Image (spheres, rainbow, N blue to C red):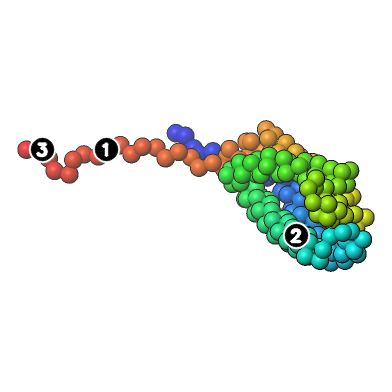
Amino acid sequence: MSYPVSAPARRPAGVTFAAVALVLMAAGALLSALAGLLAMAGTVDRFRAAAGTTTAGQDQVDAVVTLIRAAAVLSAVVTVLAGVLLVGLALGLLAGRPGARIATWVVCGLGLLCGCGALALLVGQRAAPLRLGGEQASGELLGTVADAYPSWWLPLNGGLSAGQALGYLVVAALLATPAVNAWFGAHRPAPVPPVAPGPPPYPPR
């Protein structure tokens, strides 16, 4: 007589550490969103002051200001949604849901790519500010955008991007350890054996 395999009573430390790392990464994402919104007003003021020394018209300056504000708000919304997703994955891991572990691996892969891309964009923006080869006024305006951000903007976002990328690697590695594999494997539902056909309801004639 066989008995169903029960899940280990104690959760592996790797699962707990992975969940804590996801929550910390979610907090970092919220910090990045808040910093972006707080920096937006000062960035716009500094940009308008710098734009006064260019040949750009008021309509062009207003268009770039709208772009700066829209980018800050959109980035904050996406970052908050990503933080909520990370918290949801952490709760799923703590509950022992195998689907949450698979989803976490997918998010780790995508997050690693996005984190490296964001870090490269920040460094490139500071090293070579965006300039257009077309209209001179537009090129002058876009060239002042990077300088309009506060001095702590690049170190903060660069540090958060690097930390997020490292966090995704750590979480993915923790969820691939043998103890975690065994714990999640024990939480998979046992296959239902096929039901043998019963006798016909009426005797044959």
Residue 131 shown left or right of residue 102 in the figure:
right
Q: Is residue 154 visible?
A: yes
Q: Residue 204 has which mark?
A: 3
**Mark 3 belongs to which amino acid?**
Pro
Within 10 Å of disc 2 (Cα), the crowding (few <14, some 14-19, many 20+) is few
- Picture residue at 47% right of the left edge, 34% below the top: 2
Quarter of image, res 199: top left
Residue identified by numbered label 1: 197
Q: Is residue 171 visible?
A: no
Q: Quadrant of the N terminus?
A: top left
Quarter of image, res 26: bottom right
Q: What x and y, as percent, mark residue 129?
A: 86, 47
Within 10 Å of disc 1 (Cα), the crowding (few <14, some 14-19, many 20+) is few
Q: What x and y, as percent, mark residue 124?
A: 84, 43
Q: Distance between the residues labelled 3 and 2?
A: 81 Å
**Mark 1 belongs to which amino acid?**
Pro
Q: Is residue 40 above or below residue 111?
A: below
- Picture residue at 76% right of the left edge, 54% below the top: 29
Q: Distance between the residues labelled 1 and 2?
A: 68 Å
The front one of 167 and 122 is 122
Q: Which of marks 3 and 2 is nearer the N terminus?
A: 2
The nearer-to-camera label among 1 and 2 is: 2
- Picture residue at 79% right of the left edge, 51% below the top: 135
Q: In this view, does 116 lie above or below 31?
A: above
- Picture residue at 78% right of the left edge, 48% below the top: 134
Q: Is mark 1 on a helix, strand or loop?
A: loop
Q: Which of marks 1 and 2 is nearer the N terminus?
A: 2
Residue identified by numbered label 2: 67
